[in-house]
Image: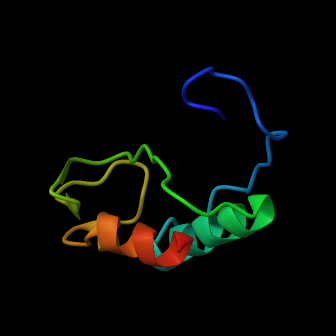
Amino acid sequence: MDVLSGALTAWRHEYPKPQPATPASVAEALRGLTRHFGWEGLIGCAFPAMVRAGVVHTTSNVDESWIGMNTRDLFSKESG
C-alpha cells in the first residue's frame, strides 16, 4: 500500500495464521510475505501484545514464548 495515497500497490496475499504463533513461526510468515512481494524497505506491523521499546511484555493471541522477545530486532532481521 502506498502510505501517502492509500492506493494498493499489489494484490493482497494471505498466509495462514501460524499455529502455534511462536516467534519462529511468525518470523517465517513475515519472511515469506516480504519475499512474495519482493519488498525491500521499511515495514509496519501491528502486534497483539504490550510492546515497549520493541520488547514484548504481555501476550494475547500469540504464544507466551514472545514475552521478553525483542520484536523490533526479530522482524528487522527476518524482513531484511
Q: Nearer the viewer, residue 37 or 74?
A: 37
Give percent across and percent down for residue 21.
50, 65
Which residue of the protein is positioned furthest toward the top in this rendering? 5
Give percent across and percent down for residue 15.
73, 56
Q: Number of labelled discs? A: 0
71 above or below 51?
Answer: below
Give residue 58's quadrant in the image.
Answer: bottom left
Q: Residue at x 64, y 56 (%)?
A: 17
Is the image coloured rainbow, by chain, by secondary structure, or in one colour? rainbow
Give percent across and percent down for residue 29.
63, 67
Give residue 62's quadrant in the image.
Answer: bottom left
Q: Nearer the viewer, residue 51 or 31?
A: 31
Give residue 59's quadrant in the image.
Answer: bottom left
Q: Residue at x 54, y 70 (%)?
A: 79
Q: Nearer the viewer, residue 7 or 16?
A: 7
The quadrant of the rendering that contains the N terminus is top right
58 above or below 76?
Answer: above
Horizontal side of 37 relative to 1 (left or right) equals right
Is residue 45 among the parts visible in the rendering? Answer: yes
Horizontal side of 54 relative to 19 (left or right) equals left
Give percent across and percent down for residue 80.
53, 74
Is residue 19 among the parts visible in the rendering? Answer: no
Q: Residue at x 29, y 48 (%)?
A: 49
Q: Residue at x 67, y 60 (%)?
A: 39
Horizontal side of 8 relative to 47 (left or right) equals right
